[in-house]
Amino acid sequence: MKTHHHTMISWHLVQERFRAILLFILFHFLFAPIVGTAQDNDSKAPYGTYLGRRIAPAMTHLAADWLIRGDRESEEDPDRLLSHLDLKPGLLVCDMGCGNGFYSLKIAKAIGPEGRVLAVDIQPEMLQLLSRRSIEANVENIDMILGTTTDPKLPDNKVDLVLMVDVYHEFSDPKSMLEKIRKSLKPTGKIALVEFREEDASVPIRPEHKMSKRQILKEYEANGFQLLSQYDGLPWQHLMFLGPKD
Ligand SMILES: C[S@@+](CC[C@H](N)C(=O)[O-])C[C@H]1O[C@@H](n2cnc3c(N)ncnc32)[C@H](O)[C@@H]1O
């Protein structure tokens, strides 16, 4: 009996170790594209450049769990971020590059049943994950839109706010995306852009997944946008509001 018990314990240990090794490998292959430090820098730009910036690869849906990790609350302070978006019942808000909907679900609740979230992503798997999560959360005011790398397929002249969290730097065609987003906005509409701070070396994110304010302004001004306001109090990210320059 005792021997059997010991065998069971050691088998359990083997399984645990095996799981740990698997997780380690998964982490390196799936998450390493985003999590990292400035020392990981390489000079290659396999996904091209835009106005002097290296474009990052899109984060794969296989790593979607990383987007709903427990640490995200302390790293990003999403409630603080949301409190600066001025969300009101009835708004039409686009969560651009929504992933599995970490923010879509929060926005959907904040704007109430009269409001709608347009959740856009280019990976159908991300939208499927979001669809499952919104059913579980009993949220019914999210429309899922499968966009392309050049067109988010938004309605013209209707959107109050386009939130982009940790996605703009992944656009393979930022020019075309900004043109389409611009067309989708109401005259009073704006973009809330959230990007990891490149200026801050202590933010442990790979360089191609970070942006400086200077680069953001360079790219947005080149596409007919102007800075409306900004909030500098998030732990790791810039929050900048941009609207069409008339
Ligand atoms: C790092 S994830 C962030 C997801 C989400 N915004 C969040 O904060 O949890 C970036 C997402 O942007 C999507 N994406 C990349 N390029 C896109 C594009 N041109 N249009 C829409 N989504 C895009 C990717 O498929 C991926 O799901």
Image (tube, rainbow, N blue to C red):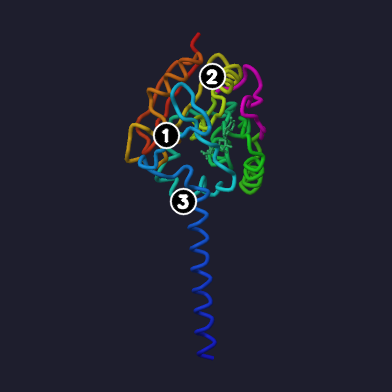
Residue name at image x 45 percent, y 46 percent: 72
* Local SS, label 3: loop
Tag nearer the camera, 3 or 2: 3
Mark 1 nearby-residue class (10 Å; few <14, some 14–19, many ≥20): few
Q: Amino acid at mark 2?
A: Gly
Residue closer to the observer: 194 or 53: 53
* Residue 15 placement (x, y as % from top left): 53, 71
For this view, does 137 lie left or right of residue 226?
A: right
* Residue 239 placement (x, y as % from top left): 42, 29
Check the image and report above or below for 38 versus 219: below
Tag nearer the camera, 3 or 1: 1
Residue corresponding to mark 1: 43
Q: Amino acid at mark 1?
A: Ser
- Return the disc, 3 or 2, that comes first in the chain's sequence: 3
Q: CA distance from mark 3 to mark 1?
A: 33 Å
Residue 164 on the magenta segment: no
Magenta highlight range: 144-160
* Residue 116 placement (x, y as % from top left): 62, 31
Residue name at image x 51 percent, y 29 percent: 168
Tag count: 3
Mark 2 nearby-residue class (10 Å; few <14, some 14–19, many ≥20): some
Q: Amino acid at mark 3?
A: Gly
Residue corresponding to mark 2: 189
Q: Which mark is residue 70?
A: 3
Residue 154 on the magenta segment: yes
